[in-house]
Amino acid sequence: MKILIVDDEKLLVKGIKYNLEQEGYQVEAAFDGEEAVRMAHDDSIDLIILDIMLPKMDGLTVCRTIREFSNVPIIMLSAKSEDIDKILGLEYGADDYVTKPFNVRELSSRIKAILRRATSANPGKSTSDLLISGDITLDYNFRHVIIAGTTIELTSKEFDLLELFVKNPGKVYTRENLLDIAWGFDYPGDARTVDVHIRRLREKIEQNPAEPKYIKTKWGVGYYYKKD
């Protein structure tokens, strides 16, 4: 698995690179935003660790730009711990968020969890690589959804959430349930993380996000999927 680290703190990059290589990952590095976008076009990149504060192009802009051509999982790094920064990172398409200073073991566990989910599909095209529910088709090979013949690109986390809903139609999940299932029990975020992803998912798959057809809200409880 190949990981791209994007940070202008070269000593930090060196330390992360060393630890990840000890775990068997192939690691590339970029030290500014423009270089990161260029390197992210490499289809062999399996995950990106992206700092927010970067020269030439900030990390949020880099994340948004990458999302225009790739759904590669992105973990954002920042020295800021305010909630608004976490929400912004998720708004721009990040899959996870780690605040500096962090334990390398924590970062490694986040990487493993995301890569495990992102590579859960078996290689090779077959009907088993498709999950079909009404006019929704989830394609495990390409990690995107097809609705009424239209292909819609999703981030890794959006795909995970939609897959969970489609596999369990009618089941109501609280925000805490979704946080534990999709992000893991040790994820330090809160319910707003879930709300942001649900809103972004609705904006992509619903004709009218204000009156969703698929991802419904059970007021005071959580969210559920209504099969068409």
Image (spheres, rainbow, N blue to C red):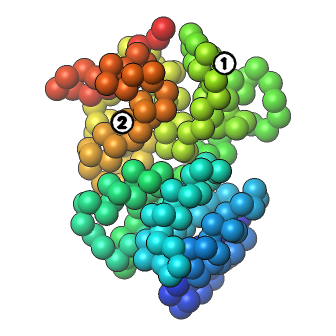
What residue does disc 1 label? 149
Q: Quadrant of the N terminus?
A: bottom right
| Residue 69, x across and y down, in percent | 65, 50
Dot 1: element: loop
Q: Residue furthest bottom?
A: 11
Please name the amino acid that badge 2 sits on.
Answer: Arg
What residue does disc 2 label? 199
Displayed quadrant of residue 209: top left
CB of mark 2 within 8 Å of CB of mark 1? Answer: no
Q: Estimate how packed mark 2 is, as few (under 14), some (14 to 19) or many (20 or more) residues with alpha carbons within 10 Å.
A: some
Look at the image and tell me whether residue 26 can be seen. yes
| Residue 38, x across and y down, in percent | 69, 68
Please name the amino acid that badge 1 sits on.
Answer: Gly
Q: Estimate how packed mark 1 is, as few (under 14), some (14 to 19) or many (20 or more) residues with alpha carbons within 10 Å.
A: few
| Residue 15, x across and y down, in percent | 56, 85
Disc marking residue 183: none
Dot 2: element: helix
Residue at 56% of width from left, 39% of height from top? 154
Rendered view: 153 above or below 53: above
Residue at 57% of width from left, 52% of height from top? 67
Rendered view: 22 above or below 69: below
